[in-house]
Image: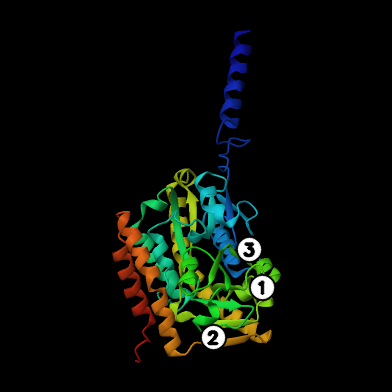
Amino acid sequence: MLAAVALAAGLTGCKEQTSGPGTAPGGQTAAPAAIKLSYSVFFPPTHIQCKLADEWAREIEKRTQNRVQITIHPGGALTKAPQCYEGVVNGISDLGMSCFAYTRGRFPLLEGLDLPLGYPSGAVATRVANELTRKYKPAEVGDVQVLYVHAHGPGILATRKPVRNIEDLKGLKVRTTGLSTKIVESLGGLAVAMSQPETYEALQKGVVEGTLCPMETLKGWKQGEVIQYVTDSTAVGYTTAMFVVMNKASWQRLPADIQEVFTAVSSEWVPKHGAAWDQADAEGLAFIQELKREAFTLPEAEQARWKEKVKPVIDEYLAAAKSKGLPGDELLKDIQALVTVASKPAAKP
């Protein structure tokens, strides 16, 4: 009897050892369960920026040998564009991509990235947005893990009726977001705030008569189909900075080596997004040319008038930042310096 009891105990002990946590049948160590993450992206799945987000996710999976699995929810399916950031903060999604400007007033320092400072390209805007977000580390984004930022090329004016000068803008209903609202108002237009997903139908139905946007939206969001004219307003070229952020708790649960993968891949994707914005702008221009839309280039004297009109937008930002104890002056100087350097033609060898 004693022998039988001892044998049974021995068998029980072996069973517990081979099937306990972290082991597979036969005593082999089981692979840890994959870390599954949700990623809310406001761009539609066909948009180049959504495709880049998907490529980023697949690269993360590859470099972690599928220890991380990321499910993308495009087109605002999980959280709408204006709710995306708070959705990440509150854990509705682990990751999110949308525009800072869709939550007006929520990011008082980073609003400065969107000022009408004559950004020449998406590559430059993206570089500036990343460098300065890293430099200033504003408390306003302290409730998430910022992975990277990207920003579109210079905003232009696309309308249902021709706009050749400031007078043509008077009373015109123009779709805007964030600081672009103040740009339109300073030029005499009537700003109507809305996100990109709402804009096509608003233009189609005449709810708005124009949109202040990057050229890429005319193809990427098909808005070239519902406008007739494009005014090159890059003299007051603004941008819209867009975040890729992660829920704090989700980030902190990642092992250190996986955090390093996220950081490395995100850094590599910054120039990819900048280049993609410029490629999309070129495709947007080709799209409206194919549709036979009429384009206007403002004469230099008219460009100077537009610049003078939007100057109060910059002054108002600086005053608001100062009242909150934020380094708006320093941020503005940094933006202008980076834009100036980036806009200079490359020296000939």
> 244 or 3: nearer the eye?
244
Q: Report the disc number at residue 306.
A: none
Q: What's the CA distance linking mark 2 and mark 3? A: 27 Å
Please rate how many residues cluster around mark 2, counting C-alpha atoms within 10 Å: few if below 14, some from 14 to 19, many from 20: some
Please state which of the two labelled residues, at mark 1 or mark 2, is closer to the viewer.
Answer: 2
- Whether residue 202 is situated above or below residue 146 in the rendered picture: below
Helix, strand or loop at mark 1: loop
Instruction: Give the residue number, with chain letter if any, for mark 1.
Output: 222
Q: What's the CA distance linking mark 3 and mark 1? A: 10 Å
Q: Outermost residue, top direction?
A: 1
Disc 1 marks a residue whose amino acid type is: Lys
Q: Position of residue 75 (x, y in %)?
A: 64, 59
Dot placed on the residue nearer the N-terminal end, 3 or 1: 3
Instruction: Give the residue number, with chain letter if any, for mark 3.
Output: 197
Q: Position of residue 147 (x, y in %)?
A: 45, 57
Please rate how many residues cluster around mark 1, counting C-alpha atoms within 10 Å: few if below 14, some from 14 to 19, many from 20: some
Instruction: Give the residue number, with chain letter if any, for mark 2.
Output: 164
Q: What's the CA distance linking mark 1 and mark 2? A: 23 Å
Q: Residue at x 57, y 43 (%)?
A: 31
Dot placed on the residue nearer the N-terminal end, 2 or 3: 2
Helix, strand or loop at mark 3: helix
Q: Position of residue 307 (x, y in %)?
A: 41, 79
Query: Could you tell whether 244 is left or right of 309 in the image?
Result: right
Q: Position of residue 85 (x, y in %)?
A: 51, 52
State which quadrant residue 347 falls in. Answer: bottom left
Helix, strand or loop at mark 2: loop
> 29 or 278: nearer the eye?
278
Quadrant occupied by the C terminus: bottom left
Q: Residue at x 42, y 73 (%)?
A: 116
Q: Residue at x 58, y 35 (%)?
A: 27
Can you see residue 326? no
